[in-house]
Amino acid sequence: MPIPKLYNTLTRSLESVVIRNGKVGVYCCGPTVYDVPHAGNARAALVPDILVRLLRSLGLDVTYVRNITDVDDKILDRARKSGTSPLELSGGMAKVYQDLMAQLGCLQPTVEPKVSENIAEIVALIGQIIERGSAYVVERSNGTRDVYFSVRSFSDYGKLSRRKIDELRVGARIERDEEKSDPLDFALWKGASADEWGWDSPWGRGRPGWHIECSAMSGRYLGHGFSVHTGGMDLIFPHHENEIAQSEAAQPGSGPLAQCWLHNGFLNVDKEKMSKSLGNFVTVPDVLKRNDPEGFRWFLLTAHYRAPIQLDTETLADGRVTFPSIDEAERRVDYLYSTVERLAELPARSSEQVITLPKELQPFTRSTTDNVQAAESSLLDDLNTPVALAALGELLKSANELCDLKLKRRKDPAFVRAVEIPGFTLDTAIRQVTGWLGLLQSSPAEYRERTRRNRADRRGLSTDTIQGMVNERETARRERDFARADALRDGLLNLGVSVKDTPSGSVWSIGA
Ligand code: AMP
Ligand code: ZN
């Protein structure tokens, strides 16, 4: 079995995924749910999705954990402002996130743990770290107690981000409300007064610090030393550095928290990281108002996950914002669905009949094998999705050439019959590659149906108006008024609507 190689931030090198008894654990740092996700957050969910798909296609038993951070000061602030409780707000936003990621074709994680449902595990882990002498309790002037991790106690601190403690200390300062012994120490537990949001603990009421949750939840669901930990590059420091310190300090001598640390590059706007705090963000619903989710997915796959990806925007005269590169990706998805639909019209394969393949058709079976291999080996080589997309493009090109050839030679029944062999293998190959990439998750009819409304909206049309024109054209054809039927077809074409006549009636679609 081929084993995928991934770039490990910890060792700065490509390494084979560590598999234990056919099992692989993948942990993805999920969203802090105080608002709807932005386009960059979608990239961070898509990268582990591609990895999990690839590992499962190799027959591995993958446990995929993507957490939900539902305890956080930003959630508390937002809830206060909107007059709801923090867990009510985060519960709603978590559902929005899950629904959007599913629309983008992301697999449902095996477990999607929430911080609020793992407080006992968090408290137990903090207790363990204190016992090991790597954390200390501080009493604050208001009587509440915090727990801090002592960075000095963990000699490997900085090994992931390659930062030196002494250099870090220069820039660090202690906030006024913190009473820690070293500016680099970070909170494992933050005390809260009786009327504040919080949970009981051996150190009194409070809430967990940000980093401890991922140590506790990965430990609970994957155990220490699991295979791959993922997240955006912004999480390398301090979040992942601190996760390592906590988990490894709690269990000295038991090896690394995770075997491989995989970090995705940013989705940028004007060369700057898209983020809520910079205010340069486009939400996933903003994108889906204009584009099909599969087009957005294709766009995200066009760059290698470690490279930045640029989201261009264009503002139309009427003020609407468009995303030209996602539009372009959507046209590729159109091509994918239309190709699969064309392939389905080829003769169905009948296994009993062995046909010798005419020379003319042999390159098609070769192209199939070569391109599936190219897609697989590029994904195995650090999830190189742009190369896999290029191989998929070659398969689609071959499929269309095959369909064209069949049309040209339609008067030769033996040839048409032989086309079934490369047709069948091309169809299987396209499904295999799109399976790795999480594309082609609908039928062509479902895709057409789904894209119609968005695209009609973009052109300021209603689907009812278009359907009305299509019906009128069908009537004209039935009444043999071909001049009128043609005029209606031209009118539709001017609107970007193409009509295909099938035995079961006219089917229309709008271009991306
Ligand atoms: P957050 O909700 O801010 O904790 O982010 C959730 C995930 O999205 C984390 O893995 C972040 O690293 C990742 N992320 C945030 N902004 C971007 C961006 N602009 N591009 C790619 N990933 C991002
Ligand atoms: Zn995390």
Image: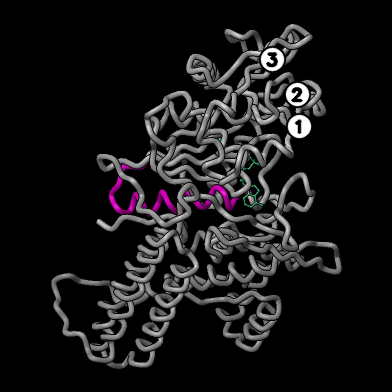
Residue found at x 36% / y 83% = 402
Q: Amino acid at mark 2?
A: Thr
Residue, disc 2: 84
Structural crowding at the residue carrying mark 3, measured as other residues with C-alpha within 10 Å and reported as few (<14), some (14–19) or many (≥20): many
Mark 2 packing: few (<14 Cα in 10 Å), some, or many (20+)?
few
Q: Quadrant of the C terminus?
A: bottom right
Label 1 secondary element: loop
Structural crowding at the residue carrying mark 1, measured as other residues with C-alpha within 10 Å and reported as few (<14), some (14–19) or many (≥20): few
Query: What's under tag 1, amino acid-wise?
Result: Arg
The verdict on residue 46 being magenta is yes
Q: Which mark is residue 191?
A: 3
Q: Are marks 1 and 2 in contact (CB under 8 Å)?
A: no
**Amino acid under disc 3:** Gly
What residue is shown at x 50% (from left), y 45% (from top)? 230
Q: Quadrant of ligand 2?
A: top right
Residue 380, compared with residue 501, is above or below; it is above
Q: CA distance from mark 1 to mark 2?
A: 34 Å
Q: Is residue 455 left or right of residue 22?
A: right
Residue 333 in sight: yes
Camera-side mark, 3 or 1: 1
Residue 495, percent from left and from top:
70, 76
Q: Is residue 236 above or below residue 386?
A: above
Disc on the earlier residue, 3 or 1: 1
